[in-house]
Image: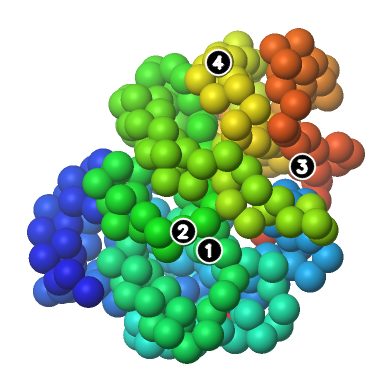
Amino acid sequence: MDQFLLSNCTLCPRNCRVDRTAGQTGVCGQTDRPVVARAALHFWEEPCLSGDRGSGTVFFSGCGVGCVYCQNRSIAKGLAGKEITVRRLADIFLELQEKQAHNINLVTPGHFTPQIVEAIGIARENGLLLPIVYNCGGYEKVETLRLLEGLVDIYLPDMKYRSSQIAARYSRCGDYFEVASQAIAEMVRQVGEPVLDEEGIMRKGVIVRHLALPGCLEDSKAVIRTLFETYGNKIYISIMNQYTPMNTPEITRRYPELNRKITDEEYDELVDYALSLGVENGFIQEGETASESFIPEFNHEGV
């Protein structure tokens, strides 16, 4: 592991430059030891990832983005999770393979990239054959992503916003669209067009997620339009309607517009817009997904 990457940390666009090897923390809130909140089969990803056996999902603690509406707030803020070694992380990958997972799915992994690179190497030497999924918020540095070239098979980033004003309000990163656009371009360069096996399980490719937010329909359309104009059907676009109001005092006071679900009409209009553009490689959510729980218990299962 390259300790310099962690002793003067610029792994993410926040460029905190803290010495994580000395216990200092930046925006992500993490030192140089991997912290994992859960490692288990997960059945709530896109069908080509979860399949019928589940995605071998590893939830890391900490986050360099910090969206005000985060559904995984307990781990994003580092309130849950267990500190482990790189060797233990490699063993977790192998244990998930033994459970017949379709892939190894790394959730919010960016701030632990050097440790993950080392763990994948150890696991590969000991028989890991599964595709690696890099599941992130899209606010990633190209230089950090290049450390993963040849190791990650499937990229699963968000493209949250087109508007710099909305990005600044909800995620404190007005440069989100520019940074995420460059990151996704690098992801597509690395893994190319989608490859699915005979069971419909993805082996390589990029799936870009977009979570529709209340009151942001036009921005959502701009995101979908930009992705399709840039990549056509060379990527999958996953349009999600599962936004669930947090109903916390902070959200109620500072972001009252977020205290509702998106309406069926808003979501249907967004999906219809995507279809009108010609989007064919895509996923949509149906039913009352905002009332369902896509969030597992972060109880250190499998850690």
Name the residue: 61% across, 22% down: 232
Residue hosting label 1: 132
Mark 1 or 4, nearer chain start: 1
Question: Quick check: 66 left or right of 225?
Answer: left
Using the rendered view, name the quadrant where residue 151 is placed. Answer: bottom left
Is residue 145 among the parts visible in the rendering? yes
Mark 2–mark 3 distance (CA, rounded to whole Å): 30 Å
Amino acid type of the residue that numbered disc 1 sits on in the rendered structure: Ile
Cβ–Cβ under 8 Å for marks 1 and 4? no
Picture coordinates of residue 184, whole percent (x, y): 44, 36
**Foreground pick, 151 / 112:** 151
Q: Judge depth for marks 2 and 3 and give the one in front.
A: 2
Q: Earlier in the sequence, mark 2 or mark 3?
A: 2
> What crowding class fits label 1: few (fewer than 14 Cα within 10 Å), some (14-19), or many (20 or more)?
many
Mark 3, Cα crowd under 10 Å, few <14 / some 14-19 / many 20+, is some
- Indicate the amino acid at tag 4: Glu
Amino acid bearing label 3: Ala
Image mark for residue 290: 3
Crowd band around label 4 with a 10 angstrom C-alpha radius: few (<14), some (14–19), many (20+): few
What element does badge 2 sit on?
loop
- Tag of residue 253: none
Mark 4 lies on residue: 229
